[in-house]
Image: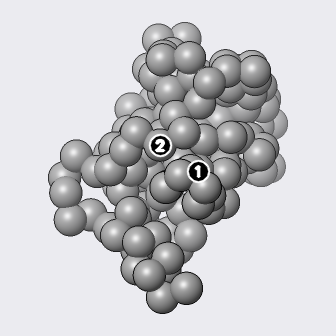
Amino acid sequence: MTRLFGFILLLCSQVAVAGYGPYRADVVRVLDGDTVEADVQIWPGLVTRVKVRLAGVNAPETRTRDACEKAAGVQAKARLSELLSGAAVAVDQVRRGKYAGRVLAVIYADGADVGSVLLREGLVRRYSGGRREPWCSP
């Protein structure tokens, strides 16, 4: 058990700038437009369930009082679900996120970077930390 815990810590550490991966993943559920919960195969026969946030992007919130942002968030979440549904999913460039229990990664569906698809479609914005801009005009 201690070795498993050590390997998971290694997986989630930021020792390497590029991160770890790729790892095969089965999406359990889409939480919002930039976060999924997935069973990630970190070793043959060894799977861990983890929340994975798309690296480098930010989606509008689905849990907000702002009706405009909420609608945009629901649309981003639906599109992410559509991209991942039935696809061969992999997570790559895995590194630790700033919130406990969540990692940042590039998520691929059938070889396509879903974050890039969502960016091209205008459903998410580039994000590298820091302050988020409002999604809707006041």
Residue underneath mark 2:
23
Residue at position x 50%, y 27% in the image? 108
52 is higher (above) or lower (below) than 49 = above
Q: Secondary structure at mark 1?
A: strand
Residue at position x 78%, y 31% in the image? 74
CA gap between label 2 and label 1 equals 6 Å
Residue at position x 46%, y 70% in the image? 8
Image location of residue 67, percent across then percent down: 80, 36
Examine the image and state in which quarter residue 36 appears. Answer: top right
Quarter the C terminus occupies = top right
Label 1: few (<14), some (14–19) or many (≥20) C-alpha neighbours in 10 Å = many
21 sits to left or right of 45? left
Image location of residue 131, percent across then percent down: 39, 52
137 sits to left or right of 42? right
Quarter the N terminus occupies = bottom right
Image location of residue 50, percent across then percent down: 61, 59
> In the image as oriented, which residue stretches furthest toward the bottom?
2
> In the image as oriented, which residue stretches furthest toward the top?
121
Specify whether residue 62 is in view: no
Give the number of the disc on residue 32.
Answer: none
Q: Secondary structure at mark 2?
A: strand
Examine the image and state in which quarter residue 12 appears. Answer: bottom left
Q: Amino acid at mark 1?
A: Val
Residue at position x 75%, y 21% in the image? 86
Residue nearest the observer in this picture, 119 or 4: 4
Residue nearest the observer in this picture, 14 or 135: 14
Label 2: few (<14), some (14–19) or many (≥20) C-alpha neighbours in 10 Å = some
Residue underneath mark 1:
40
Specify whether residue 13 is in view: yes
Q: Amino acid at mark 2?
A: Tyr
Say which label, 2 or 1, has the lower sequence index.
Answer: 2
Check contact, mark 2 vs mark 1: CB within 8 A.
Answer: yes
